[in-house]
Image (cartoon, helix red, strand yellow):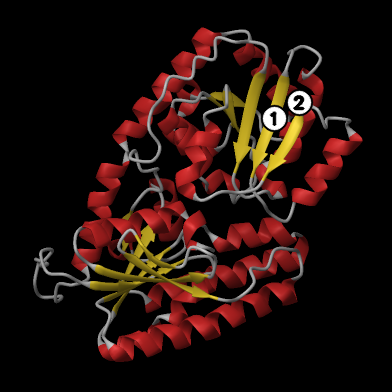
Amino acid sequence: TNYAFDGRVKRHAEALAARGDEVDVLSLADEQDGMINGVNVIGLRIPRYRGASRSSYVRSYLRFFTVATWTAMRLSLKRRYDVAVVCTMPDAAVLCAVPTRLAGTRILLDIHDTMPELYRDKFGGRRGALGARLLMIGERLCAGRADLVLAVHELHRRRLVEAGLPPEKLRVVMNVPDPATFRLAQHRHSDQSDFNLICHGTITHRLGLDVAIEAVAIARHRIPGLRLIVIGSGDYLDEAKRLVGRLNLEEHVCFEEPVPTERLPELLARAHVGLVPNRANSATHLMLPVKLLDYAALGIPTIAARLRTVEHYFGPDASRLFEPGQPVALAAAIEDLYRNPALRLELASKAHRVLERIGWVKQQAEYCRAIDSLLSPPSSPKANPTAAQREAY
């Protein structure tokens, strides 16, 4: 991904830079490369592939692997990295960091998403199932190349243990927003001349944007000024726009380009309600959606699909849940929150309290402990967090 659009990588890299570490990031190039908040962003000029072609997918990954491996190795030969942090997907990106081991660099694999489940959902059928099995094997092999592995929440950690990853090699660092950027605000919206729903992030079929669009088609006759604002890009964007046209929803649904993380709050602040309409499958049941955490940080009430990880952390008290894949149920939830401003305030308040328990201060400390643990010799229980380290992403 591009550095400016990956909130997790930005938070982690800038947290290390703020404490005095030297940090290089290798990512897809954009106009914001260079020194950013103490982080040296090195853009690799490779187009990002989005689509359904397996061969193009593989070719895109191989191009990135080649350039990233060469760049990391060249930089580490000039001056050794203490730690190389590899952020998935794909898991095999860990191979890009393996040559840096020759200079004594330790490797941390940060698994953002589980590839086997995502592959099975994306490609389907017997080939999808076979690919998922192969990727599960690859996941274990890639984790074996790393000194430490990060999961993004507790259920994710359990899934990695069930797949054969050693528990002692795993740490949990959750993907929560930085309160310095995502500040709590009171979204009371006393003017009921419009009612704004918002859904942001990657646009793919599994994340249920079509369900949200169909729900708007149902609810628009009962809610004056109903509007859905979609912020993001992805391989389902064109199909989503065609669906809006077929349902004659041009006045009720608008699409906006993705923006860097620090600009998101000002756009999300327009929302009366945030939507998390993910479909139900093995991949989405394992997700704790970033958009849900963003809404909680900003004090925006949410309507979310009833999925395992969402229920585990939030539950019906902190989010209005609906059965995934059901536009009629989502439309009913939208109308319920439209007619009940007090419920919107209650949901937003409880969701914010959930986020406070797992918030960025706690996750930042856990991340720094994970990094420092790699700097201690195996025989020594203590790291030296006061010495400046050099990390590559």
Towards the viewer: 341 or 377: 341
Residue at the spot of label 1: 228
- Asked if residue 131 lies left or right of residue 4, the reply is right
User: Where residue 375 sits: x, y (%)?
Assistant: 18, 72
- Residue 280's place in the image compared with 317, above or below, is below
- Asked if residue 200 lies left or right of residue 226, the reply is left
Amino acid on which disc 2 is placed: Val
* Residue 243 location, quadrant: top right
Closest to the camera, between mark 2 and mark 1, is: 1
Q: Which mark is residue 216?
A: 2
Name the residue: 76% across, 19% down: 219
User: Where residue 297 sits: x, y (%)?
Assistant: 41, 33
Amino acid on which disc 1 is placed: Leu
- Residue 269's place in the image compared with 119, above or below, is above
User: Where residue 335 sits: x, y (%)?
Assistant: 68, 14
User: Where residue 43 sits: x, y (%)?
Assistant: 49, 73
State yes or no: discs 2 and 1 in contact (Cβ < 8 Å): yes
Name the residue: 33% across, 58% down: 37
**Residue 96 is at least partly visible in this image:** yes
Q: Earlier in the sequence, mark 2 or mark 1?
A: 2
